[in-house]
């Protein structure tokens, strides 16, 4: 279950990354940490795996658009 606080954070982060790319490493790390918190996963904040980052971006986008 996604809390209201997590949803607001997802919206905020998604608005920073609407083009599909985080503007800096701090935003990317926040995206990864939020996704890990919501989905109980263990992605690393320094991951450069394109498939992993696409999964995270898509997951956050889905939450933000709910």
Image (cartoon, rainbow, N blue to C red):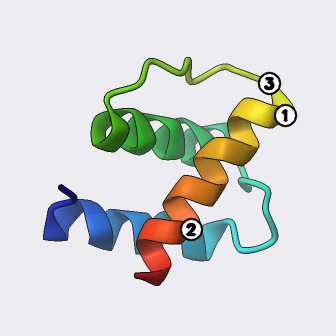
Q: Which residue is mark 1?
A: 50
Residue at the image point whose x is 44% and y is 18% from the top:
42
In the rendered view, does 35 fall on the left or right side of 43?
A: left
- Which residue is labeled 3 in the image? 48
Compute the Cα span from label 2 to label 1.
Answer: 16 Å
Residue farthest toward the front in the current orientation of the protein: 1
Mark 1 vs mark 3, CA separation in Å: 6 Å
User: Which residue matches tag 2?
Assistant: 61
Whether residue 20 is situated above or below residue 25 in the rendered picture: below
| Marks 1 & 3, CB-CB < 8 Å contact | yes
**Tags 2 and 3 in contact by the CB under 8 Å rule?**
no
Closer to the eye: label 2 or 3: 2
Q: Judge the density around disc 3: few (<14), some (14-19), many (≥20) Cα neighbours within 10 Å.
A: few
Q: Which element type, helix, strand or loop, lies under badge 3?
A: loop
Q: Do callouts 2 and 1 mark residues in contact (Cβ within 8 Å)? A: no
Q: Secondary structure at mark 2?
A: helix
Query: Which residue lies at the image location 81% right of the left edge and 71% below the top edge?
Result: 19
């Amino acid at each position: 279950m996604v809390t209201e606080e997590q949803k607001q954070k997802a919206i905020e982060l998604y608005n920073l990354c609407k083009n599909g790319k985080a503007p800096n490493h701090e935003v990317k790390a926040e995206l990864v940490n939020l996704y890990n918190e919501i989905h109980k996963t263990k992605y690393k904040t320094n991951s450069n795996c394109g498939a992993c980052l696409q999964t995270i971006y898509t997951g956050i986008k889905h939450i933000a658009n709910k």
